[in-house]
Amino acid sequence: MNISLKQHCRWALLVPTSMGLRVTPENGQPVQGSDVLHLQATSAETNVASISSYLGLPVKVLTAFVKDSPFAAFIKSNLRARGMSYEGPDVPQGGPWGYRHQINVADSGYGSRGPRVWNDRAGEVGRILSVRDFDLERIFGQEGVQIVHLSGLIAALSPKTSQFCLDIARTAKKYGTVISFDLNYRASFWAGREDELRKIFSEICSLSDILIGNEEDFQLCLGIEGPEAGGKDIAAKIEGFKGMIGRVKNEYPDAKVFATTLRQVVNTNEHQWGAIMLAGKDWQMVEPRPIHVLDRIGGGDGFVGGMLYSVLKGWEPKKWIQFGWACGALATTFLTDYAQPADEDQVWSVWEGNARVKR
């Protein structure tokens, strides 16, 4: 099965996102025991897009910035360094208690001490994103986009971003752009908005070609009946996902691809990592196998990014899941929460388990 992509497009991949700052201690230390912290630019959606941008495909980011903020300048510089074009308004801060970029404080954990992530999103400038800030007719109609990737994180961030993502999905559908949607359920984002968000997520799913999420994502976002969570039992997770997808396909018959990752944590630095995907009528699976983990955050985004890159390259579905698995595994070897592949060969070496030196 192949996914038909628009040709002669300026952008291979487009992502709407709210950019922020990621702060991490040195050497796997906990935040409360550290006085030296590294600053990174981050967002789940640009984590996904990094695979394509580092491997040379044209990527566009739609976001918002705080005007004259040194952190906004830092984020813009980072996106340029990652080979991404960006577009979006520079919003006046409005004083000390006005807008800012989100802050993500991350302890990567070590050994028996698990990671901890603390999010501070008060006053986040990305919460006011609106299609009024962008010329979608130009972007999708004149310039052209092959795939737009949406995440449940930006789609549920605020009422404005929910409408923003829905409007983007509608415009993408109008112009024949392939739509990828990772449901990414977060209980804190959904609190008090369940009915509103379920309606919006359901419409985005009805427009999507590629749906990504685990059993809980599909149940909690869409209200589709599913089995109890499988816990650490990978076989139960696989069967649960397969059963769930049958019901999802009945509700959203236009979706062509469904995928999720499989992860079992042995300790912070060793995981069993796998994936399962339905493309058309054919199941593809990577049996969980051990990977070494420097920082686990962003592994799932790396998987999605690798899968979408494979679709953009026109490869067969078997390679979609293999390359996605390897990009996710590669991401966990970086201190950034996104993978920075040197080339395709490096990714395939991860898939093959070949960590020998290359001179």
Image: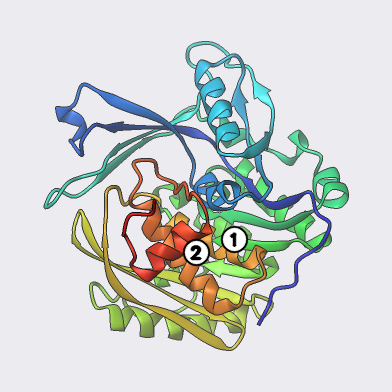
Q: Secondary structure at mark 1?
A: helix
Asked if residue 99 shows in the view, the reply is no
Circle 2 Cα neighbour tier, 10 Å, few/some/many (<14 / 14–19 / ≥20): many
Q: Viewer-nearest of labels 1 and 2? A: 1
Quarter of the image holding residue 25? top left
Report how many numbered discs are placed on residues in the image: 2
Question: In the image, residue 96 lies at what x, y percent?
Answer: 48, 12
Q: Label 1, label 2: how many angstroms apart (C-alpha)?
A: 26 Å
Q: Secondary structure at mark 2?
A: helix
| Residue 293: % across, % down | 27, 54
Check disc 1 and give the amino acid type: Tyr
Find disc 1 in the rendering and name its residue. Answer: 309
Position of residue 282 measured from the top left corner of the image (x, y, whole percent): 55, 87
* Quadrant housing the N terminus: bottom right
Indicate the amino acid at tag 2: Cys
Q: Residue furthest right?
A: 142
State which quadrant residue 38 falls in: top left
Placement of 109 over or under 277, stated as above or below: above
Residue 223 percent across, percent down from the top left: 49, 71
Does 136 appear above or below 20? below
Q: Residue at x 14, y 48 (%)?
A: 113
Q: In terms of sequence position, does the residue under pointer 1 or pointer 2 come before the other?
A: 2
Determine whether 292 is above or below 63 in the image: below
Few, some or many C-alpha atoms within 10 Å of disc 1 (few <14, some 14-19, many ≥20)? Answer: many
Instruction: Kindly check if marks 1 and 2 are in contact, taking CB atoms under 8 A apart as contact.
Output: no
The residue positioned farthest toward the front in the image shown: 359
Q: Which mark is residue 221?
A: 2
